[in-house]
């Protein structure tokens, strides 16, 4: 038998037992993936878990291999790693990453998954989705030589984006983060992390990933004249207030949306999604990315993990606050 994780109602998720799928041996390109690990993308999956996907964007927000429809019941997720155990001979035994939900097995085609480069662990490969998003953000408004750049919000997306940006020849790169523990983590990675009140002004490009109204407001404050804020946060059904008064018009600021569902406009005619993902996987050849894995749980614990990561965490000390990439391990999920 096989297992699929489903969100049945708001804050109610669980595993469904299903027949073990088999790849069609006559298809020529169909694969069966036995999952070794998946990861929770906390921001989006918390919105799914709590039923806060706006009805008007339900179609746009579907994951590639999602089962069911928003709001419930739905089987969602897009960070999965596994081993090919059925399919064309030259694929057998390959380690692959795919935009796959939390299932013990998947039937996909060779075009749905990407080979994991040698030297990159299964767990680090789960960060490919975050790195792909960061790459797309940097393609959206590419920083130029000696630019001053700030990243606001050191979650999984913000930190991945900052690690990519740290390879560029910038004059200044600051990561603006409210949590002192995350600022310490960033400093250990060789990044310059500051509290919001200490953020430098006159930035050429500000990348906002905090998902908070306060973060966006601070981003506009530290953007220099004629500068650009790249808005990479998604707020679900919330409607943040954007401070477009004061000096927004006088200083000719710009806000550009960035969303990973499409290749950034500046590269869309020259890069496919597959090429973008291949670049993201190659970029993971950097040991610093292992620091983004902040927790590992067994697959049976996923319902509890999802609820914890979607919590309000008002005291600022629980998993919802501290988690970056939380890995789900599938050891024991393939036997009875």
Image (cartoon, helix red, strand yellow):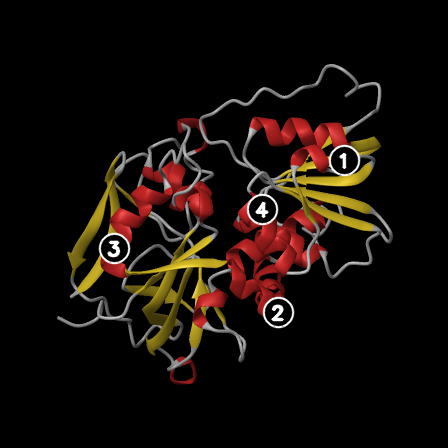
Q: Which residue is mark 4?
A: 154
User: 10 Å neighbourhood of mark 4: few (<14), some, or many (≥20)?
Assistant: many
- What residue is shown with label 2? 286
The tag earlier along the polypeptide, 2 or 3, is 2
Q: Circle 3 sits on which residue?
A: 301
**Label 1: few (<14), some or many (≥20) within 10 Å?**
many
Q: Which mark is residue 228?
A: 1
Residue at point 63%, 65% (across, down): 279
Residue 227 lies, with reference to residue 6, above or below; the image says above
The x, y position of residue 35, in whole percent, is 33, 67
Q: Quadrant of residue 113?
A: bottom left
Q: Secondary structure at mark 1?
A: strand
Q: Nearer the viewer, mark 2 or mark 1?
A: 2
Q: Of residues 58 and 226, which is closer to you in this image? A: 226
Which image quarter is the N terminus in? bottom left
- Label count reads 4
Please indicate, yes or no, whether residue 90 appears anywhere in the rendered image: yes
**Dot placed on the residue nearer the N-terminal end, 3 or 1:** 1
Badge 3: residue crowd in 10 Å (few <14, some 14–19, many ≥20): few
Quadrant including the C terminus: bottom left
Q: Residue furthest bottom?
A: 89
Secondary element at tag 2: loop
Indicate left or right for 193 with 149 as reference: left
Q: Is residue 214 above or below residue 43?
A: above
Q: Nearer the viewer, residue 335 or 178?
A: 178
How far is the residue under mark 4 from the one under mark 2?
A: 18 Å
Q: CA distance from mark 3 to mark 4?
A: 26 Å
Q: CA distance from mark 2 to mark 1?
A: 28 Å
């Amino acid at each position: 038998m096989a297992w699929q994780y489903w969100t049945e109602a708001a804050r109610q998720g669980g595993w469904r037992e299903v027949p073990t799928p088999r790849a069609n041996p006559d298809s020529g390109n169909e694969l069966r993936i036995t999952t070794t690990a998946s990861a929770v993308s906390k921001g989006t999956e918390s919105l799914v878990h709590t039923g806060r996907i706006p009805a008007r964007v339900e179609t746009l927000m579907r994951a590639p291999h999602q089962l069911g429809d928003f709001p419930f019941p739905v089987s969602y997720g897009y960070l999965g790693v596994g081993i090919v155990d059925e399919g064309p001979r030259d694929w057998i035994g390959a380690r692959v990453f795919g935009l796959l939900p939390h299932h013990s097995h998947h039937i996909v085609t060779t075009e749905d998954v990407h080979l994991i480069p040698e030297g990159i662990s299964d767990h680090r490969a789960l960060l490919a989705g975050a790195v792909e998003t960061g790459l797309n953000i940097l393609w959206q408004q590419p920083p130029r030589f000696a630019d001053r750049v700030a990243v606001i919000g050191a979650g999984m997306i913000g930190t991945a984006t900052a690690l990519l940006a740290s390879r560029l020849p910038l004059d200044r790169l600051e990561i603006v983060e409210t949590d002192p523990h995350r600022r310490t983590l960033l400093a250990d990675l060789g990044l310059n992390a500051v509290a919001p009140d200490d953020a430098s002004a006159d930035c050429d490009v500000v990348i906002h990933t905090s998902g908070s109204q306060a973060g966006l407001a601070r981003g506009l404050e530290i953007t220099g004249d004629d500068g650009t804020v790249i808005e990479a946060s998604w707020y679900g059904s919330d409607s943040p207030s954007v401070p477009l008064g004061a000096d927004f018009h006088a200083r000719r600021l710009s806000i550009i949306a960035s969303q990973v569902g499409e290749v950034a406009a500046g590269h869309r005619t020259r890069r496919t999604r597959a090429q973008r993902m291949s670049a993201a996987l190659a970029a993971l050849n950097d040991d610093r990315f292992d620091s983004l894995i902040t927790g590992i749980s067994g697959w049976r614990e996923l319902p509890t993990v999802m609820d914890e990561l979607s919590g309000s965490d008002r005291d600022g000390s629980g998993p919802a606050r501290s988690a970056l990439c939380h890995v789900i391990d599938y050891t024991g999920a393939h036997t009875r």
